[in-house]
Amino acid sequence: MMERLTARTQLHGSIQSPAYDRQVLKPGIVHIGLGAFHRAHQAVYTDAALADGFGNWGIVGVSLRSTEIAHDMRAQDCLYSVVARDRSGDSVRVVGSIVEALAASEDGEAVLARLADPAVCVVTLTVSEKAYGIDPVGGGLDHAHAAIVHDLKSPTRPIGVIGYLTEGLARRRDAGQPPFTVLCCDNLPSNGRIVRRLVIEMAAARDLSLAGWIEENVSFPCSMVDRIVPAATPETRARAEKLLGVEDRLSIEAETFSQWVIEDDFVSGRPAWEAGGALFVKDVEPYEKMKLRLLNGSHSLIAYLGQLHKLEFVRDVMGVPENVALVRRHMQAAVGTLDPVPGIDLAHYMDQLVERFENPAIAHRTLQIAMDGSQKLPQRLFQPAVDALSSGSDGAAFAFATAVWIAFLKQAGTLDDPRSGELLKAAADVVQTDDETASFFAVPGLFPAELQANRAWRDGVNSLLKSLA
Ligand code: CS2
């Protein structure tokens, strides 16, 4: 059997590996959501920060759903590799910043003990849009979300991200300890503010004074994260094995590009993530909007075009010149909804995006990006459409992307989306009128009121949908 990557592995000198003493590294961060994105993003920035100026910033990685990731991590002493890939080749790096891995469903009490430990100063999150339990209509807690329902009922034995944060903060307050900073790294607009609202609401449901304490003492900075990290496949692991000379079941591949812009508002200190290239700013919103609307909005368009035309990977969609033209047109429309972004040349950013999407070394499944549309499209397409319309544009590019999504829904037999039932029902609706998409616009909280009320824009979606068929 092939030897597995562990702390005892003698790695070849050419492989970049932790340039600090892991044996004395103590935890200072809890990260919730131990998936590929975290391992290729925040953990890499922390690795760089530790190498640059050592401190107690080891990461306790918590997986809310998968137990396998935590087991695999422990079997490898929490070491794993990231293979950065582009046209010019591969470069491999072994990351050492994660020091402990916990599966919440097996060891919830250990997770809570870490959250209660005052040595932990920052809690970072990558749990995906749907895990928060945001009410699509009101924006507060979704009382139909299973984890929210559970955690409101059993706040000291939580299962969801908001429940864990709230109980962790409650234990800090009760012990007279300072809080941790909550740093959301999911693709949501003003992500810190969203999480803050949910945590305070959950706290208020059990104890108003806890909610007040959180409001006064805890910070929830916003952040924009970016790196294209496809789900790992058997090829990913085979490639890692070749590069490392040992087996690495946790290896991931990613593009070379990486970006992290963070609102500098930490109540209990933070790592010097600047060492990995993170940018600390006062206001993240312009960066966040740029990324959500230009990268993620185009990504969703590409994903649904790919699904309609049976193209498996993003790079395949970008191999068709007509599609590249559609993506560029979409970006032109989206950039018109943005304010200037400090330090960024938006024309260059868009060119760079096209190149990133075309990266021949990255196999990013359109099906992966196509999932959870109900959770992604409001910030990627619908709010930008509202902004475009209110500044006098016809919003046609957004109507087109919306029509492509609806065409995808109409041909999808099953759907990976928390609102799949409602969406499939809307797709199956037999329409007697010209208003073929009426059933989608009737799904509560999916489209903003401004779009629901805009007859001309909706007629545009209808006629584009017809032309796609
Ligand atoms: C993608 C993102 O799956 C998706 O919805 O658009 O995961 C995207 O790859 C990242 O946000 C890039 O930073």
Image: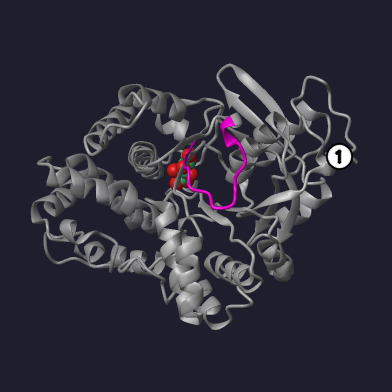
Residue positioned most to the front: 176
Q: Position of residue 8 (x, y in %)?
A: 90, 37
Quarter of the image with the N terminus is: top right
- Check if residue 135 falls in the magenta segment: no
- Residue at (52, 32) in percent of width and height: 258
Q: Is the magenta stretch mostly helix, strand or loop?
A: loop
- Residue 226 in view here: yes
Q: Is residue 138 shown above or below 336?
A: below
Using the rendered view, name the quadrant where residue 76 is placed.
top right
Residue identifier under label 1? 7
Which residue occupies the foreground of this view, 149 or 42? Answer: 42
Residue 362 image offset from top left, x and y in percent? 55, 31
Q: Position of residue 277 (x, y in %)?
A: 55, 29
Left or right: 77 with respect to 293? right
Residue at (63%, 74%) from the top-left corner? 174
Residue type highlighted by circle 1: Ala
Question: In the image, is residue 348 above or below residue 98?
Answer: above
Q: What stretch is highlighted in magenta?
A: 260-274
